Amino acid sequence: MAQTLQATRGSLPGVQASERRSRAKNARARAHSRRLSPFLLVLTGWTALAHVPVAMASAMAASALGLPWPWAIGAALAVALVLPFHRRMLAMMPDRPRPRWQLALIEAPYFAHWCAASFALAWTTAAAMAWVVGRIALGHAPFGLNQAALWGYLTGALVAAWGVWVRRKWVRVRRLDVPVRGLDPVFHGYKIVQLSDLHLGSFNPEETALRWVRLANSLDADLIAVTGDLITSGEDYYASVQSVIRELRARDGVVVSPGNHDYFGDAEALFDHVRASGARLLRNEGFTLRRGGASLQVAGVDDTWTRRADVHAALAKRPDGAPTVLLAHDPDLFPIAAARGVQLVLSGHTHGGQIAVPFLARWINLSKLSHRYHLGLYRDGPSHLFVSGGLGTTGPPIRVGSAPEICVIRLVASHA
């Protein structure tokens, strides 16, 4: 009887479809987990190391309070703060809605602490070097390392609080003119408003993204370009993506190209939501804007991390001599695009490092460690690349020195 029921149940089309979707979802989750495991291992190792100064500072505080076993107290506190890290990261992979009180009272403070501990590690390492030099040069220690660790953590906590609760939410508008060789005078002054790396999720909910939309809509765009990473991960925010993209307004519409995070779930379902919003999704394809007898080609490429990007296919239908704007989430595609005569590439992906030296973000930011093109405008002959710092965040929800931004790019005719 049980076998009959099981056979009948398995033969129902609706049940079969549901089971297929469930298996596919589980397979995506396993594949995503495999991709992220080495990354999480490195981050967890860094987290453990960053809590050495926390243990030192805690031991000093316990000693000052006259508590017994100060080093045991410091070590226990550090371990207790390291253990939740892995769980915090897994909670964002896939990202699911969480209560606001949890984000405000647990998640954000924990990541602020994590950033403070990381800052303290760098500070204490530099202090240890100075301590060794002082011992050699002066014959005695010029200061205590525990004291240096404490001051490093307190300074880091102030910086992290600014980055998590203020700078991350304070969006700037960046404006720049880009010379485009062969641009017809009728397109001179054409205004593209670029949004990148929205990363809709628990730390960047729909209401936050709608504030970005209102700002973008106030900039009087001819075209709005969204250059990938619409979500952080998972599938719970697809409807929010549709609601947000649907509200964007520009004379020639909205175009979207995918990013790597858009494949951390059911990408095709996400793309259906993008199309339903009324935006034009560009996956290795393009279209031509025409004004009178003049034309401007707009194209977009798919994701590089999943090896879907194809610049040649994206440019296949480009009219001869038409200036081209290419949306490519990953800026590493710029050399290929420049070799194909693309005048302007719009990218994101790097977030400007999220952490940079204030006022020197273009030159000193974390993304520079792993990316050749990491923030701002680059040139290769007549071709230009603009890398937006983006709007959202991944990992720790913090920005220091690298502002979230909406970019207004004005095309200007050039014969140089």
Image (spheres, rainbow, N blue to C red):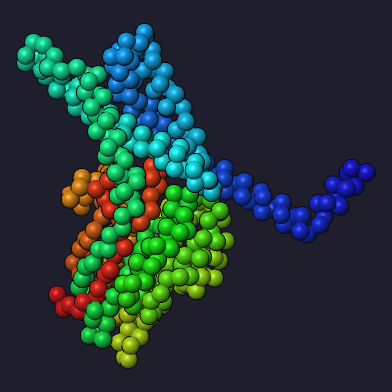
Question: Which residue lies at the image location 35% right of the left edge and 85% below the top edge?
Answer: 290
x%, y% of residue 123? Answer: 22, 29
Res 37 seen here: no
Question: Which residue lies at the image location 21% right of the left edge and 77% below the top edge?
Answer: 412
Residue, far front? 65
Is 217 positioned to the left or the right of 91 in the image? left
Is 3 positioned to the left or the right of 95 in the image? right
Residue, far top? 68
Judge whether 134 appears above or below 288 on screen. Answer: above
x%, y% of residue 27? Answer: 60, 46
Is residue 265 or residue 273 the one in the foreground?
273
x%, y% of residue 190? Answer: 28, 78
The image quadrant where one finds the N terminus is top right
Q: How many marks?
A: 0
Residue, far right? 1
Question: Which residue lies at the image location 35% right of the left edge and 56% below the top edge?
Answer: 391
Residue, far bottom? 292
Judge whether 387 appears above or below 159 on screen. Answer: below
Res 114 seen here: yes
Question: Which residue lies at the image location 26% right of the left edge and 70% below the top edge?
Answer: 409
Is residue 126 or residue 145 the one in the foreground?
145
Is residue 168 or residue 264 the one in the foreground?
168
Judge whether 281 appears above or below 267 on screen. Answer: below
The image quadrant where one finds the C terminus is bottom left
Is 214 positioned to the left or the right of 176 in the image? right
x%, y% of residue 304? Answer: 41, 56
